[in-house]
Structure formats: structure tokens, C-alpha cells
Image (spheres, rainbow, N blue to C red):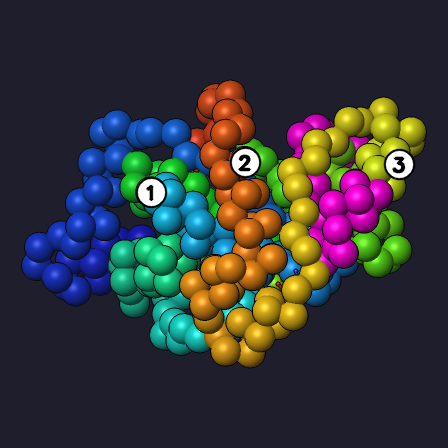
């Protein structure tokens, strides 16, 4: 299958695309990439908007950013951005397309990997095919500074795998009580069953900074009381009708409403993310990330 994948790549173009070239260069010298899952317990709290606009800001700050659309349900990022990807990761797995042909360029220079259905198929590859695929996907690491994973909501299998494989986890929470209890439930399972210890909380759709703090304290009081776990506060995004307007227009908020309240918040969160310097170790590499995802079928 992977041989077909390589063949498709060769047939597509006699010479290598810039992406393919840098992917092979990356195999020679991997540079660290930040792999961050954007997740939530409850659905509809703003993950896709946050991932997309953070990617926009990070790209503007000269951080090469790839978004992985890992929501198996509906195609998300492409709808929000008005893009129409013809292919996704499943076409790479079937050998129809090369990886570089599947990655789309979004607004502001962000890159998007529509993965959706392909993720399920990854678990069904043979051992050799998995290794070749990990090599191929891991090679992208040299090209990017950030990989943001837009996950589905909840605690279903795939969401857990992406969070466990990512090095950093951003939990998006809105002030709604069910969003708060579901965020706690997600953190609890990731901590108790998978040993995840580092969580950053992002309060979305809040009226002001004190409401954001209240949301954070509700979740963090519960995690420290019941789990003895300290979580971090990443920041907040204000509730802003411009967000919905941007969604309706299928454009990035950052692009069409740069002066909106919500966009200012997103910009400062992107800056803060750049200031945070996690320790880099094997589990911070892109190869490790893909290996964890591809290997999930074995457990
Ligand atoms: N800060 C905000 N202010 C106002 N509306 C917002 C804000 N953030 C999100 N929304 C609204 O919430 C809707 C859902 O957002 P989004 O699709 O990003 O959520 P999600 O968590 O990715 O959902 P799902 O769990 O279905 O993937 C948006 O279409 C938008 O209308
Ligand atoms: Mg979404």
C-alpha cells in the first residue's frame, strides 16, 4: 500500500515538490515541533474556531503551522474556512495521492491536513506499512513549528488517542455548567487512565476576564480536590458575534475581523503559546506522535 503511495507521489511529479524536498531534508535533521491537541469534553464549545485562528496568528508570527483535522464526524476546518479538499489522508493510505498533494494551504499561510476518515484505516495497516507511513508523516516535522490537532469532543476512543499522543493539551471550556463538568470528566480519564498530567485550560465565550477565571477555578478546584492535579490557565476568548459572522462567511475571524474582541484574545493566546517553552524529548517529536496514533490499533 505504501509502495503505491510512493509510486503515486513519483507519478504526480517528476521532480519533488518543495514540501517533499523539505520532508526528506527533515529526515536528516529533525527540529522540534510543538504538537498541541485542542480538545473539549462537550461539543460545540469553539475548538475548530480556536484551532483555526490560532493557526492563522502563529503563521503570521512566522511559525509554520499545520492543522490536523482529526474530527471523524463532520468535516470541520474546511467548512469554517470555505475550502473544499478533494482528498484526505485515506487517499494517501489507498495509494491514490501523495501526502504533499493532500495538504491544503489555508488563509494566512497555515497548512491543513484533512485526516478524518483516514485515521481509522491507519490501525489496519501491516507493521511494515505502518513504519513507512510513520516515516512519511514524521518527515513533515522538519517543515513545521506547530501541529495543532482539532479533535472531536468527548471521551470516545479517537479523541483520547490524539490527546495522549500530543505533547500538550488545550482543553476548551465555555461557562455552561455541562461544559465545565464534561471538561473535568475528560481530564479525569486522561489523567487516571492514561497518566496525562499537563493540561492548559482555555475559557471560550466568556463575558470578561473574571468570568474566565471563575470557569478556570471551577475546573481546577475539582482537579486538585479529586485528582490532586494542578492544571494551567492558558487564557480566554470573549463571546463575540463576529465569530459567528466569520463562520457564516466561511473566513478566518483573524483575517476579516482583525480588530474584533475575540480576535485580540486569540492573538494574545498565540503569543503566549510561543512564550511557553516545553521541554523537548522523544515524546515531543512528530514521529512519536504519529507512531502513537498508528500503533493505537494494537492496544
Ligand atoms: N468566542 C465566541 N464567540 C461567539 N461565538 C462563538 C465563539 N466561539 C465559538 N462560537 C460559536 O460556536 C460555534 C461552534 O464553534 P466550533 O465549531 O469552533 O466548536 P467545536 O468545539 O469545534 O464544535 P464540535 O465539537 O462540533 O467540533 C461557532 O460556529 C460559533 O458560532
Ligand atoms: Mg469542531
**Which one is nearer the viewer's eye here, 142 or 206?**
206
Residue at (65, 60) in percent of width and height:
46
Q: In this rendering, which labeled residue sits more in front, label 3 or label 2?
A: 2
Labels 3 & 1 near each other (Cβ < 8 A): no
Residue 55 vertical placement versus 224 (above, below):
below
Residue reaching furthest to the right: 225
In the picture, the disc for residue 62 is 1
Q: Tell me if residue 239 can be seen.
A: yes
Q: CA distance from mark 3 to mark 1?
A: 38 Å
Q: Which residue is mark 3?
A: 222
- Residue 29 in the image: x percent, y percent? 26, 27
Outermost residue to the bottom: 248
Label 2: which residue? 272
Q: Is residue 74 visible?
A: no
Q: Is residue 279 magenta?
A: no
User: Does residue 272 appear left or right of residue 192 in this picture?
Assistant: left
Amino acid at each position: 500500500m505504501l509502495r503505491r503511495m510512493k509510486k503515486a507521489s513519483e507519478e504526480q511529479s517528476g521532480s519533488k515538490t518543495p514540501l517533499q524536498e523539505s520532508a526528506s531534508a527533515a529526515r536528516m535533521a529533525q527540529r522540534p515541533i510543538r504538537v498541541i491537541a485542542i480538545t473539549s469534553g462537550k461539543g460545540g464549545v469553539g475548538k475548530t474556531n480556536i484551532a483555526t485562528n490560532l493557526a492563522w496568528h502563529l503563521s503570521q508570527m512566522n511559525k509554520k503551522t499545520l492543522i490536523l483535522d482529526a474530527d471523524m464526524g463532520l468535516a470541520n476546518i474546511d467548512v469554517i474556512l470555505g475550502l473544499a479538499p478533494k482528498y484526505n489522508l485515506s487517499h494517501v493510505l489507498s495509494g491514490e495521492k501523495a501526502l504533499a498533494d493532500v495538504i491544503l494551504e489555508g488563509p494566512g499561510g497555515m497548512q491543513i491536513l484533512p485526516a478524518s476518515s483516514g485515521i481509522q484505516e491507519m490501525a489496519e495497516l501491516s507493521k511494515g506499512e505502518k513504519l513507512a507511513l510513520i516515516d512519511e508523516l514524521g518527515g513533515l516535522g522538519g517543515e513545521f513549528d506547530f501541529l495543532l490537532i482539532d479533535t472531536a469532543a468527548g471521551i470516545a476512543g479517537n479523541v483520547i488517542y490524539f490527546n495522549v499522543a500530543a505533547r500538550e493539551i488545550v482543553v476548551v471550556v465555555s461557562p455552561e455548567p455541562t461544559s465545565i463538568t464534561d471538561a473535568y470528566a475528560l481530564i479525569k480519564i486522561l489523567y487516571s487512565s492514561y497518566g496525562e498530567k499537563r493540561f492548559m485550560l482555555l475559557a471560550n465565550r466568556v463575558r470578561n476576564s473574571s468570568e474566565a477565571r471563575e470557569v478556570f477555578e471551577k475546573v481546577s478546584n475539582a482537579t486538585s480536590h479529586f485528582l490532586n492535579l494542578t492544571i494551567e490557565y492558558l487564557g480566554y476568548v470573549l463571546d463575540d458575534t463576529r465569530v459567528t459572522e466569520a463562520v457564516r462567511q466561511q473566513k478566518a475571524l483573524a483575517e476579516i475581523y482583525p480588530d474584533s474582541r475575540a480576535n485580540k484574545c486569540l492573538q494574545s493566546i498565540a503569543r503566549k503559546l510561543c512564550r511557553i517553552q516545553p521541554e523537548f524529548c522523544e515524546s515531543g517529536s512528530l514521529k512519536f506522535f504519529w507512531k502513537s496514533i498508528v500503533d493505537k490499533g494494537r492496544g
